[in-house]
Image: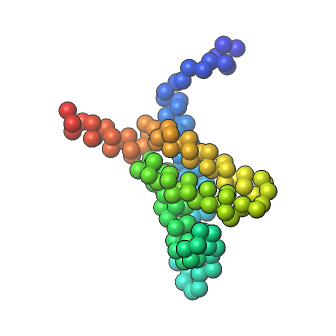
């Protein structure tokens, strides 16, 4: 029973779960981005929403950048905190503008992503990431 209520952190477990969260959320969002990338590469007239008033073409490019490119960076743990910023903005646009008038059921998925992204923004990529390799190399050069 004591182990069940223990609040001490096992650092290896935390780093492993940061990896799991990064990869899982990155893959989930990558699916959305891949679909939009297909629309972008299909050619022809782009019919995409313009929730922030920059035009449908630029809106689609921004969505593909966030959902596809930044998701790949998130999965790799490369420039993680920078990659999370467009993802967070995308979720805020989805929650507040695209689904603004809708009920909670339409906003719920975006809120799940947003909470995961905010957690990763604060926690960072963790030990099992390219960011960690870069950080260790930079630390070794300063000595």
Residue depicted at 72% across the width and 61% down the height: 99
Q: Which picture quadrant has residue 7?
A: top right
Q: Is residue 38 visible?
A: no
Q: Point out residue 110 in the picture as x, y percentages from the top left corner.
A: 66, 54
Residue for point 21% across, 39% down: 141
Quadrant that contains the C terminus: top left
- Which quadrant: the N terminus? top right
Q: Which residue lies furthest to the top in this view?
A: 2
Find residue 22 and report its horizontal and vertical position in percent: 53, 46
Q: Is residue 89 visible?
A: yes
In the image: residue 78, left or right of residue 32: left
Q: Is residue 138 above or below residue 49?
A: above
Q: Residue at x 68, y 64 (%)?
A: 98
What colouring method underlies this structural image?
rainbow
Residue nearest the viewer, comparing 126 with 119: 119
- Image coordinates of residue 115 in percent, x first then y, are 62, 45
Q: Which residue lies furthest to the bottom in this view?
A: 44
Residue at the spot 72% in from the left edge and 60% down from the top edge:
100
* Viewer-side residue, 108 vs 27: 108
Q: Does residue 131 sit above or below 15 in this rendering?
A: below
Q: In this view, does 44 lie above or below 21?
A: below
Judging depth in this view, the residue of 109 and 2 nearest the camera is 109
Does residue 135 lie above or below 33 as drawn? above
Q: How many labels does the image show?
A: 0
Q: Nearer the viewer, residue 122 or 131?
A: 122
């Amino acid at each position: 029973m004591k182990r069940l209520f223990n609040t001490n952190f096992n650092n290896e477990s935390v780093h492993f779960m940061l990896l799991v969260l990064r990869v899982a959320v990155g893959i989930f969002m990558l699916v959305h981005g891949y679909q939009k990338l297909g629309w972008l590469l299909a050619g022809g007239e782009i019919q995409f929403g313009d929730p922030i008033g920059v035009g449908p073409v630029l809106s689609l490019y921004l969505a593909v950048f966030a959902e596809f490119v930044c998701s790949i960076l998130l999965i790799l743990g490369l420039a993680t905190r920078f990659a999370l910023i467009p993802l967070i903005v995308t979720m805020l646009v989805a929650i507040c503008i695209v689904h603004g008038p809708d009920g909670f059921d339409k906003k719920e998925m975006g809120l799940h992503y947003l909470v995961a992204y905010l957690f990763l923004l604060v926690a960072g990529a963790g030990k099992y990431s390219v960011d960690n390799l870069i950080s260790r190399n930079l630390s070794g050069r300063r000595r």
